[in-house]
Amino acid sequence: MSPPRLPSVLLPERIALDKIWGGVVLANRLGIDRSRLGETWDCFDRGPDASARIRNYGGARLHAIVEKSREALLGVALPDEFGRFPLMLKLLDATQRLSLQVHPDDELARSLDVGDTGKTEAWVVLEARSGAELVRGFHGSAECLVDAARQGRVEESMLEHVFAHRGDVIEIPPGTVHAVGAGNVLYEIQQNSDITLRLYDWGRVGDDGRPREVHLDAGLRAISLRSNGSETPTSNERQVAEGVELVVRNPCFELRRIALDRARRLDLGGSCALVTPIDGAIRVGDIDLGALTTGIVCAAAGRISIRPVARDTATVLVATPRIAVPSVE
């Protein structure tokens, strides 16, 4: 018996996670009663029993839909090497700064035998407190940075800092040393991976009173993927149509930012997409999405209408697996 027909837009159920670095800024925006909300997972597929439930499809799990209705959901896009939905989307509230980290690429992740892919990710700054910073890159050699971490003395001067502003877009390829500074709220789109190699945690301890685990040997291997540790964060934005900017393009995904001021047609080129209004509410097909709510537009939807509701304009982020080349008319 074939599964019931998919809606054009799937509504994944969000989960909220407490973190020692979290706070109430994002919680207040989302109406979640948490005092230490660090991140929400807004689209995720970590396997059969750990993927998002779809609110408008009987609570079915996203992983099961990938297995049973792959063509209708993904179209020309492919699952990852573990048979999962290829992208993951999070919102982050860094009331305190996160640890200094680096991510592996796919090849290194396989050699580490962690049961996950590598991680390519990108951030869009939704809110930034005055003076808030991000770290992307470092000065000197990878060996010196890791040695300093082993000795518990990573100095701020060793790191490449940049002030964060609302609307900034920052790409984090594998091998990039990075950290989210205090006072930032971020949209994070990434490969479907939950692997993080922690290098340094600023002398902080976890809820158990012990220092959190670091991964210095694997981290050093990951850093060596990058030819130059210090890089200036750039978004490489370019306008691809009126009101549409291509803000990220990498081997894993593309991200477009749309200034939506009227009804338009979103053509996904035969693939799926994650659609998230970050300012204002929108209607995609016959589904309303409030601000910071994500919908998965199924490939079978083809060209689908998208328009602002309740106000004249909205700002929308559209993430697609790299194989897709969406257009907006």
Image (cartoon, grey):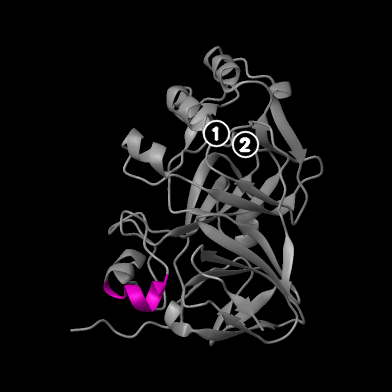
Q: Is residue 285 left or right of residue 140?
A: left
Q: Are marks 2 and 1 in contact (CB under 8 Å)?
A: yes
Quadrant in which the C terminus is drawn? bottom right
Task: Compare marks 2 and 1 and give the one earlier in the sequence.
Answer: 1
Q: Secondary structure at mark 2?
A: strand
Q: Is residue 305 visible?
A: yes
> Which secondary structure type mostly characterizes the magenta part of the structure?
helix
In space, the residues marked 2 and 1 are separated at their CA atoms by 6 Å
Say which of 125 and 244 sits in front: 244
Q: Residue at x 81, y 44 (%)?
A: 130
Q: Where residue 172 sits: x, y (%)?
A: 59, 45
Q: Residues within 10 Å of mark 2 (few under 14, many from 20)?
A: many
Horizontal side of 287 relative to 235 (left or right) equals left
**Please, is residue 265 above or below residue 188 in the view?**
below
Say what amino acid the circle numbered 1 marks. Answer: Gln
Residue that carries the numbered disc 1 in the rendered image: 101
Q: Is residue 230 magenta?
A: no
**Which quarter shows the N terminus?**
bottom left
Query: Can residue 279 be seen from the camera position used here?
Result: no
Residue beneath label 2, please? 179
All told, the count of numbered labels is: 2
Q: Looking at the image, which is closer to me, 171 or 28?
A: 171
Residue shown at 70% from the left, 73% from the top: 280
User: Bounds of the magenta span?
Assistant: 68-76
Dividing the picture into quadrants, the one containing residue 177 is top right
Residue 160: where, in percent of width, then height?
A: 71, 31
Q: Please say whether residue 69 is one of the residues in the magenta stretch.
A: yes
Hey, which residue is sitting farthest top in the picture? 151
| Residue nearer the viewer, 127 or 69 | 69
Amino acid type of the residue tagged 2 in the rendering = Ala
